[in-house]
Image (tube, helix red, strand yellow):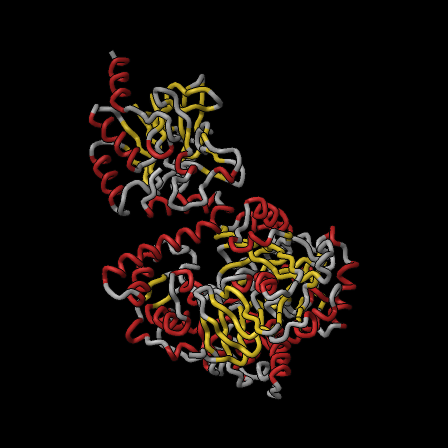
Amino acid sequence: MRFDAVIIGGGYAGCTAAEALLGAGLKVCVVSEGLSLAVSGSKAPYSRLASIQKRGATVLRGDRALSAILEDGRVACVKTRNLGPETMLEADFFILASGKFFSRGLLSDKEHIWEPVFGADVEYGTDRTSWYDDDFSASQPFMGFGVKTDSSARVFVGGKALANLYAAGDIVAKDCKQVNVNKLIEDYAGRDK
Amino acid sequence: MPSKEYDVIIVGGGITGAATARDCALRSLSTLLIERGDICDGASGRNHGLLHSGARYAVTDREGAEECIRENRILRRIASNCVEPTEGLFISLPEDGLDYQANFIKKCQEAGIDAQAMDPAEALRLEPAINPRIIGAVKVPDASVDPFRLVDAHILDAQRHGADIMKFTAVASLVKENGRVVGVKTAAGELIRGREVVLAAGIWTAGLAREAGVNIGMMPSKGALIIFGHRIANMVINRCRKPANADILVPGDVVSVLGTTSDKVPIDTCDDMRATPAEVDLLLREGEQLVPSLAKTRIIRAYAGVRPLVVADPAGDGRNVSRGIVLLDHEERDGVPGLITITGGKLTTARLMAEMATDLVCKKLGSTAVCKTAQLPLPGSEGRKPRFEDPFVERAAIGRHGTEVSRMDFEKGGEILCECEHVTRAEIAYAVENFGVRNISDLRRHTRIGMGTCQGSFCIRSVAAALAEILAPDAAAAAKLADEFVNQYRQERWKGITPVLWGDTLREAEYMQKVNGNEI
């Protein structure tokens, strides 16, 4: 399946990006597992996804991106749980908007925090005691952990920014760039001509 | 105006103090129990919840083992609502060998503990979660006991037999006249007179005694534990080897508790006990040998308590330390009449400790009253449990409070506030009335509110509002108090969450941060 853009995550960040891209006439696919924390009320994200779908996007509900194939510093395709290992979601660019821990955009064990789909570089403290503040109401370090992006919000994997993978929303590390979808649309339009 | 003089003042509202107050009250002594915080706030509320069969001590401490099995049988009878007769298994792994097991069974039987060797295959059939590499298993009469419920029952019975319970009142010093301890002075400056003063304040005993010129060499021994969000095994699972770190897993209600560690800590850390990430890592590494699936089980939180161990020789290096019962007659030992210390021991043997302390109090006061605590059932465990129609609400309350539910008004307060534990408004009202609950942490200890699967994530605001409504004089004060309760609750729970902050616990923490409106 081929799209202009594939968005991983159907929460606030994913929906916002999808709406902008649809507005510019792009062919969009949203993979939404439905574990969003950012939108209050459980029904809100579903109705927003419904309108995105009505506007022509492919919305893979209750599905989860499992892995990606990387080629020449680019994302070639993404595979999902429900589509299975044979089906490839291909796109010119991908937006990672899968959220933090609650939505399983980031996974963790006693020593590590990682991004499971692309193996993106994650910014976090190496010692677990630096992940939290003893004061519950203080700013919690783990709330600032996330994937590293460059000045164009492209995601780093193995120390190098992938050319066509951008990040948006909670999964982006504090102080790192969030994707500018309008800029993406401009670049995309420019490249078509 | 001279204040009232009690026959006996007991300092400390843990299981030892509560059991002593009960025993004294049952022997018709005018009794005061004084506690600086809420009851069950120290080591009594920070342990495994294990009713020892004595098997763990059989090899090294015959006397301790015999005490345990005797008290184990008594508590099953008098505190049936607090004890779940799960039984226990001692399992041997290949690296433990079977020599220890053979001696263990022999020593258990010598101490009167019914220890039966079991075929490993049969043990695995009973408890599929235990390490499949086991080469041996022994069944013993260990059980699970709810320490909060047990202390509450003692407090209720003491009160109902005339004892006064004074909570949130710190003892600033012991008052001496002509070399004799004649009472206590509270932090607020009030003098309360007692013919005998019994120190039952766990690790805090040494500091109080020092004030009166009495030196008790105590060594705080920290024990860290982890609570898992599932009941992984139905029996108490022990390792059949010399006691070591993380070798006991105890089922309790719907959770499992793994512990413990044993480390000497400075006395000034005892007021703020918390498990550390390093202790959690150690507990998990060892615990996975016992039950491998612990590695993948959701952890609710970690916590730590302090054992009040007594050093036989205060000048010693700490090796000569007693985990047994220590009863000190300071008139004989230090020439300070009017003062008695009861410490050491275990949750399992608290009733016996209380009996020993009360025997001494009676001797001093010239009373010949005999101990009845081994025969009389505790409140909540008196006879058959009542039956209610509602399959969830009242059944949960009966589970917690047994026959005490007859004092709760479900007609008026049947609304469930804590969904995980099915705690109703009626139960909150009961706790406030019977235990002088002042804040949400107290309420938790007496009702299990917020101790379930969601750890208060969903219910805490409505629970806080309900409690504040009872305690505050008007609506504006109630709203303010409810906010304080929520913050207090979150802060207190956070202490136990941070040492296990990864995986699903980290997921929940992000959720809690968002729900609470904390910004990054």
Which residue is most to the bottom?
A: B368
Up the image or down, B49 lies above or below B78; here it is above
Count every numbered label the image shows and give the total.
0
Q: Position of residue B235 (x, y in %)?
A: 59, 64
Of A180 and B71, nearer the camera is B71
Q: Nearer the viewer, residue A49 or B331?
A: B331
Tell me if I can see residue B135 in this picture: no
Q: Camera-side residue: B297 or B348?
A: B348
Give the percent coordinates (x, y) of residue B67: 68, 73
Residue at 62 percent of width and 88 percent of height: B368
> How far across and down, in percent of the image, does residue A30 sit?
31, 33
Q: Is residue B316 left or right of residue B237?
A: right
Residue B267, horizontal then vertical, whole percent: 59, 54
Where B479 falls versus A163 (above or below)? below
Q: What is the residue that sits farthest to the front in this orientation?
A: B178
Tell me the quadrant of the picture where the C terminus of chain B can be found. top left
The residue shown at (59%, 81%) is B374
Q: Is residue B7 left or right of residue A10?
A: right
The image quadrant of residue A188 is top left
Image quadrant holding the N terminus of chain B, namely bottom left
Left or right of A137 in this view: B74? right
Location of residue B239 (image quadrant) = bottom right
- Identify the residue at the far top of this view: A193
**Residue displayed at 47% across by 50% down:** B495
Closer-to-camera residue (B135/B67): B67
The residue lying at 56 percent from left, 51 percent from top is B294
Is residue B127 among the parts visible in the rendering? yes
